[in-house]
């Protein structure tokens, strides 16, 4: 039975723990120059309806590190762009490949891919969720804090796809997520309800200072996500006061790290001095996309990771 990764809640807490442990091991093997070709002969398709730097490069390099192969598929260059249906594309690709990663405007596109594929489908970002990002973020916090239970993460800004995945991760990690957003840009109510129903601790407020007080971790993302470009002017207006700057940082637990999934817009959601400052762990997050996704790929394509080194 194939397993997809469309949402962080497609994993239970044991599976999440296992993937993070595997990711840390893969990171070590890579840094020591030890071969770990656990996916030799395997192929990953990567369909990108939207641009990407981190997701594209980390999946492609990840497959190469694992001895496999990744194919970049621009929808405009394959028959999808000329109207071939998703369900037909999904069934055909299932006959060639071992997994497909899809980045799509609509989450429903990825769900449809998953429904008709007989191979694992990975959500590489949709309008609703970005579980691969949060997987790498959780790894980054595990490296820093060890035990994550009872840590408080303050999300400042848009209640977007990355925010939604953070909210959904709370039942798995035991962390608390406090979101400060302008009322119009709060995370999806259904996502918050789902997380709470599974035991997650999520609070929604309007005032960034309230969210940041006693926070162990701060997180932000761009105010104008891909697909929201038409709303740029009104969003820039609505998010005034939601910048993570040195003043806001002062209110958090001393030394609390600052996270951002990138790409960043300095001077909008994050001040240059914060992004470049000693509290920023954004480059570690970006690096860990590689290690976390390699561990995910091995799990989805092979099952368990081989224990021999
Ligand atoms: N954080 C992230 O997913 O970046 P890309 O859009 O560059 O893939
Ligand atoms: N929220 C952003 C994340 C980019 C990685 C977007 O969807 O554009």
Image (tube, rainbow, N blue to C red):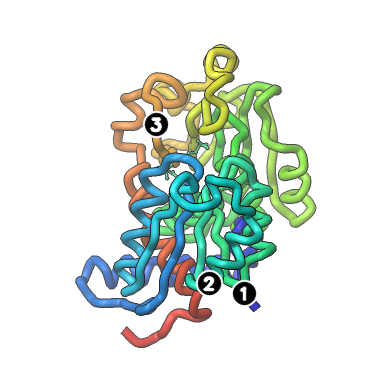
Which residue is identified by label 3? Answer: 264
Question: Which residue is painted at 61% across and 26% down in the image?
Answer: 210
Which quadrant does the C terminus fall into? bottom left
Assess mark 2: CB under 8 A from ligand 1? no
CA distance separating discs 1 and 3: 35 Å
Q: How many residues crowd around disc 2 within 10 Å: few (fewer than 14), some, or many (20 or more)?
A: many
Q: Can residue 152 be seen in this view?
A: no
Of circles 2 and 3, which is in front? 2
From the image, tell me which residue sits under label 2. Answer: 300
Of pointers 1 and 2, the one earlier in the residue sequence: 1
Q: Name the residue under label 1.
A: 2
Q: Do the residues labelled 1 and 2 touch (CB within 8 Å)?
A: yes
- Decide: is 264 above or below 257: above
Q: Which of the two labelled residues, at mark 2 and mark 3, occupies the earlier sequence position?
A: 3
- CA distance for labels 2 and 3: 30 Å
Give SS at disc 3: loop
Relative depth, front residue between 86 and 306:
86
């Amino acid at each position: 039975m194939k397993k997809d990764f469309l949402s962080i809640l497609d994993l239970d807490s044991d599976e999440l723990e296992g993937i993070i442990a595997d990711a840390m091991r893969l990171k070590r093997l890579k840094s020591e120059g030890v071969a770990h070709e656990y996916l030799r002969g395997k192929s990953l398709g990567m369909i990108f309806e939207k641009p990407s730097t981190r997701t594209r490069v980390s999946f492609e390099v990840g497959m190469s590190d694992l001895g496999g192969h990744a194919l970049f598929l621009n929808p405009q260059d394959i028959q999808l762009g000329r109207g071939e249906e998703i369900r037909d594309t999904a069934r055909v690709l299932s006959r060639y490949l071992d997994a497909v990663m899809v980045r799509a405007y609509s989450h429903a596109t990825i769900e449809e891919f998953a429904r008709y594929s007989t191979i694992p489908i990975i959500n590489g970002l949709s309008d609703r969720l970005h579980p691969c990002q949060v997987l790498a973020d959780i790894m980054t916090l595990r490296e820093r804090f060890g035990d994550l239970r009872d840590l408080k993460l303050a999300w400042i800004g848009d209640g977007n796809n990355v925010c939604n995945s953070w909210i959904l991760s709370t039942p798995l990690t035991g962390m608390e997520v406090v979101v400060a957003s302008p009322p119009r840009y709060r995370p999806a109510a259904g996502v918050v309800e789902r997380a709470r129903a599974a035991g997650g601790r999520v609070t929604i407020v309007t005032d960034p200072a309230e969210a940041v007080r006693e926070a162990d971790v701060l997180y932000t993302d761009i105010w104008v996500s891909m697909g929201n470009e038409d709303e740029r002017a009104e969003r820039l207006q609505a998010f005034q006061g939601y910048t993570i700057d040195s003043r806001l940082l002062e209110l958090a637990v001393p030394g609390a790290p600052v996270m951002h999934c990138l790409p960043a817009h300095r001077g909008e959601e994050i001040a240059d001095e914060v992004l470049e400052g000693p509290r920023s762990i954004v480059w570690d997050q970006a690096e860990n996309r590689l290690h976390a996704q390699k561990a995910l790929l091995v799990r989805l394509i092979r099952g368990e990771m081989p224990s021999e080194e």
